Image: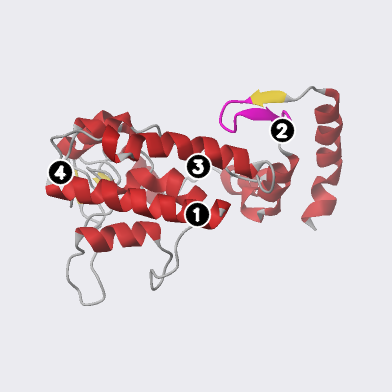
Amino acid sequence: SWVQNWYPFIMAVEALVKKEELQWNPIKKMMTPWIDLNKLMSSLKDQTSFPGNFERSSSRPNTSKTSQQSSSRPNVRQNFNGNSSRGKDPEGDTPSQQRNRRRYPHTQSMPNLKRQTNSGGNELTLEETIQRWSHKKPDYKTSNSLQHLLVTVPQTFPPRNDKVEEHEYFAKWKTLDRECFTDVSGDDLKPMLQRALRKAKFFLHPDKLPKDLTEDQSLLFKTIWNDVTDQERVTFG
């Protein structure tokens, strides 16, 4: 089993961790071990991540004619339809959309909310788009957790969400790392959630919003505020 294969390694790492002092974790805003053993063991449990498997698959050079031909071809990326295209990134974004991603870094590594349709095959409205962010699949009737909402708020911002016009205020959102709440629960989770919630509410508070918002922008901020505060009551009572 994977435990038997990796047991000596895990024990050696655990011994080293015990000798080290706790380190300040800037993401979780608390003192944590130098290496998270639970996360380490979880990654080792995934057989596809074993170094041995990687070596077996990569140690044999591919000398086939097909491989040689493909390596000599220019690097032309494939878009989401499978068609080759230049000037586009792997997500199929145009150069203009790539510039927007650089301008709005909060959208990095976030799913693209464009081109989604509802059960009737119609393009989603802004309200439906926000509901798909705030509620769980498949029926989108059960709300996501507070930590999920706080981490994924940027999914609702332009240019990822093309139902809303761009505004410089979106760039002021302080993105939370996806690892922020990983392997944290109980008494450790509560203060972290409260800190993140304070920052989110400060950004979303109606009195802090710009005065020149469009109707759709105002609806977006109002809906996010309502979803976040509703989950705050569910989480903290």
Q: Residue at x 25, y 35 (%)?
A: 209
Q: Amino acid at mark 2?
A: Ile
Residue 182, horizontal then vertical, whole percent: 60, 45
Task: Check if mark 1's residue and mark 3's residue have beta carbons within 8 Å.
Answer: no
Task: Check if mark 3's residue and mark 4's residue have beta carbons within 8 Å.
Answer: no
User: Considering only order in the chain, which callout, 2 or 1, is on the residue closer to the N terminus?
Assistant: 2
Q: Is residue 94 left or right of residue 71?
A: left
Q: Residue at x 42, y 68 (%)?
A: 137
Q: CA distance from mark 2 to mark 3?
A: 18 Å
Write down the residue under mark 1: 233
Q: CA distance from mark 4 to mark 1?
A: 30 Å
Give the magenta range. Answer: 25-35
Q: Crowdedness of circle 3 by 10 Å Cα count: few (<14), some, many (20+)?
A: some
Write down the residue under mark 3: 178
Q: Crowdedness of circle 2 by 10 Å Cα count: few (<14), some, many (20+)?
A: some
Which of label 1 and label 3 is nearer to you?
1
User: Considering only order in the chain, which callout, 3 or 1, is on the residue closer to the N terminus?
Assistant: 3
Write down the residue under mark 4: 165
Residue 199, horizontal then vertical, whole percent: 43, 34
Secondary structure character of the magenta stretch overall: loop
Q: CA distance from mark 1 to mark 2?
A: 34 Å
Q: Amino acid at mark 4?
A: Glu
From the viewer's side, name the closer residue of 216 and 159: 216
Helix, strand, or loop for circle 1?
Answer: helix
Q: Amino acid at mark 1?
A: Arg
Q: Is residue 31 left or right of residue 15?
A: left
